[in-house]
Amino acid sequence: MQIPVPKNRNHRRTLTYVLAAVLILAVTLYLALPIAALFFRIPPEEFIASLSNPEVISALYLSFFTTIITLIVVILVGTPFAYFHTRIDYPGKVIVDTLIDLPLVLPPAVAGVALLVLWGRVGLLGRYFNMFGIPIAFTTTAVIMAQIFVASPFYLRQAKSLFEQLDPAYEQTARTLGASPFRIFALITVPLTAGGLVSGAVMTFGRALGEFGATIMFAGNLPGVSQTMPLAVYVGMESDYTIGIAISIILVIISFAIMIAVRLITRREAFHA
Amino acid sequence: MLEATIAKKLRDFSLELSFSVKPGEIVVLMGTNGAGKSTTLNIIAGLLVPDSGKVVLGGSPVYDPSQGINVPAEDRRIGYVFQNSAVFPHLTVRENIAFGLRARNLPRHTVAERVDRWLDLLDIIDLSPVKAGNISGGQKQRVALARALAIEPALLMLDEPFTALDAESDRGVKAALKKNVREMQIPCIVVTHRRDDVLEVADRVCVICHGKLAWEGNPAGLPEDIDVCRCKPVPGGTGQSCR
């Protein structure tokens, strides 16, 4: 006996495709239109002219300087930290795991307030630094500290999962061959996870570059000291929106470059595997 | 000479084994998945700590809690070839073989000499500059064997070394293994679950079931019907029931 074919089956299929197309188009436009609008808001010559504006240059320089320091600190401290964290069982490991993830869900402004309460001029630790004439809040150091706090989870989580997933046979073989833990880490573990570590670092860079809330709370908004690009966008929109939009466009371009870099790296990794 | 007595509580059963391997002898540990074979190798290698026991290698204890001895894995000088060969894919074949020698801080020319010799002995000299991630399964197994032998180990252990090999590589690796173990007079343990491997490489077989020795003897005497994990007492062996 043949199973009867419902009469309106073709219609239903067409309807499904139409619905899918509408949804895909809607989501794409919702994400793409604001970005495109940025590029159409000011003529190219104005964009290029604003690039020589001292405020823009200062924000650009400060952003890159602080973000690169952040990245170096996160990689140098974060890589061995993630390694020990995954390889050693210690009491309170679950708590540390939660703390690593916390900045991802914590509102950045709250992170900034928390940093201020600890490191500010009258803060729990900050007062002692202040006694020795080492101010921390509202300095470039504070910008870097805010970025590390907010952006490091991207790298730490990635490094942790890479180290967890690495076949233990590599490190164990290296051990039986007589290699010291440092040698194993440097010559086996890190090179075998390098691709993933780089993409984690790129995401951290992106997040640090875009940092706003924690920075403005903890480091303030002083041109040349703590006014990074996102803060300069904020100020620009209130005074000279051309500058605000010009910096926004630069940030969009950098973000795109970051996404492409991550794509390329992960594709290369997949190819290797 | 290896003399090992080990006990460790595992999830489903207790591993309790006692055996020895003479220099130049290949002992095959046979048993199905989860019988405790790899755990045994890891304990001997120092990668796992047993609950009790003693491991003596070449006359000196490497694990003996009564004397407070537990030599770390990196100092036991045991050549250990893991199941998937675990060649370091980002290093060249040459760098793989040199790895253990460099880790022991041997002078550069000694490293070069020894690596050349092992590349030659295992017939992989053409692969020397190739990244180990790009070679075949059989070639990887040769590299892993050369890398383990290059450190002139006091004991050689191989975990399922023939599983992923085609017939030709299989013959080659087995021949290389037997030849070098004899020549270097190293005690050698091979873990496998395949009968063919036993007949081809073993001098002696230990069948392990649920962590206990179920049968021990000559490969020729390995009973046809020994279904290694339903191990009942086997007539003619030194076996015992392990349930």
Image (spheres, coloured by chain):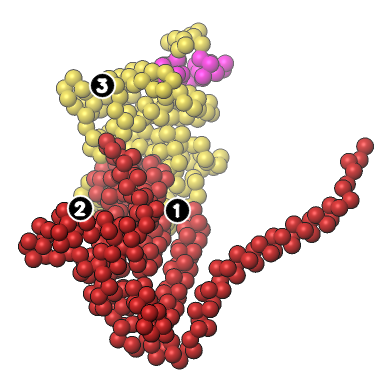
Helix, strand or loop status at disc 2: loop
Residues tagged 1 and 3 counted as in contact (Cβ below 8 A): no
Q: Which chain is drawn using red?
A: A
Query: Residue drawn at (45%, 53%), measured in percent from left and top?
Result: B133
- Front position in the image: A228 or B201: A228
Q: Are marks 2 and 3 on the same chain?
A: yes
Q: Disc 1 designates what residue?
A: B133
Q: Dot 1 lies on which element? A: helix
- Label 1 – label 3 distance at C-alpha: 37 Å
Q: Earlier in the sequence, mark 2 or mark 3?
A: 3
Nearer the observer, A148 or B97: A148
Part of the protein shown in magenta: B204-231
Residue under the point 54% across and 77% down:
A36
Picture residue at 20% right of the left edge, 53% below the top: B107
**Does residue A68 appear to the left or right of B232 in the view shown?**
left
Distance from disc 2 to disc 3, alpha carbons, whole Å, reads 34 Å
Q: Which mark is residue B54?
A: 3
Residue A53 lies in quadrant:
bottom left
Of all chains in the rendering, the one displayed in yellow is B
Q: Amino acid at mark 3?
A: Lys
In the image, is residue A243 above or below residue A182? below
SS of the residue at dot 3?
A: strand
Q: Earlier in the sequence, mark 1 or mark 3?
A: 3
Q: Amino acid at mark 2?
A: Pro
Q: Is residue B37 above or below residue B135?
A: above
Relative height, residue B53 to residue A134 (above, below)? above
Q: CA distance from mark 2 to mark 1?
A: 27 Å
| Residue ID for mark 2 | B107
In this rendering, which labeled residue sits more in front, label 2 or label 1? Answer: 1
